[in-house]
Image (spheres, grey):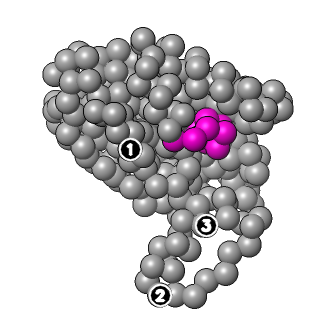
Amino acid sequence: MQIRSAALTDIGKIREENEDRYLCDDELQLYAVADGIGGLAGGAQAAEEAIARLSALTHKLPAREDWDFQTLFQTINQHVAGVGQTIDAIYGIGTTLTVARLHNQGLHVAHVGDSSCFLWRDETFEKLTLDHTVENELKVRQGRGVAVFLSARARNALTRCIGQPDPPLADVYVRPLQEGDRILICSDGVTRFSRDRELAHLVATAANPMAALKRLIELASARGGLDNATGVVIFVDGM
């Protein structure tokens, strides 16, 4: 598979620390974004540990075989949770983790939290991941006919993350890839300040992955730079 990829992160204009981390590994064709949870201590370290452990573990896995992402995420969670106990024994630490692997002509995505993975193909821009927030969890319950109440303050709170005592269930998706596909993985510092149609236009019209990322982060910055903004973009040039 012939690909081009790039990754970029920006601290923004408000935050004192960048709590986002990314992985851009063309050797394994493995890409990820982790966004440390700012409401807990050690958000940056949670993201750093998750990405480092992901890289270390996957370099030991058979490159030609499918990977068990559920087990992989549970192992990463156990490690990050252990680190968290040394930082804050009561609340621990936490991070989102969204991973994309290009393998066997397919896109394999594993996801916990509210970072996102998008696929652009044939003028269509599709969000493959579902944000694990209180609002979305309650929407699922409403769909089952359960009466729920949602406060505005709690709507964006995460219901799943890496680093807590109970291992989260990762969402895992597999999609076939084709020549011309473009993939975006990004933190919510990108998605919260841009409409999907804007992201689609920037990804679709960019000459290369880094150009797309620079425009995405410039847009987030122009709208206040209120959060860390991080992305990975992959262009599939040939199969």
Instruction: Please tell me which residue lies in front, 91 or 184.
Output: 184
Please state which of the two labelled residues, at mark 3 or mark 1, is closer to the viewer.
Answer: 1
The residue indicated by pointer 2 is 145
Would you say residue 201 is visible in this rendering?
yes
User: Are the residues at dot 2 and dot 1 in contact (C-beta closer than 8 Å)?
Assistant: no
The spot of residue 166 in percent (x, y) is: 53, 64
The residue indicated by pointer 3 is 134
User: Are the residues at dot 3 and dot 1 in contact (C-beta closer than 8 Å)?
Assistant: no
Q: Residue at x 26, y 24 (%)?
A: 180
The residue indicated by pointer 1 is 126
Determine the CA span between mark 3 and mark 1: 22 Å
First reached walking from the N terminus: tag 2 or tag 3:
3
Specify the segment rendered in magenta: 187-196
Q: Is residue 176 left or right of residue 131?
A: left
The spot of residue 59 in percent (x, y) is: 33, 27
Determine the CA span between mark 2 and mark 1: 27 Å
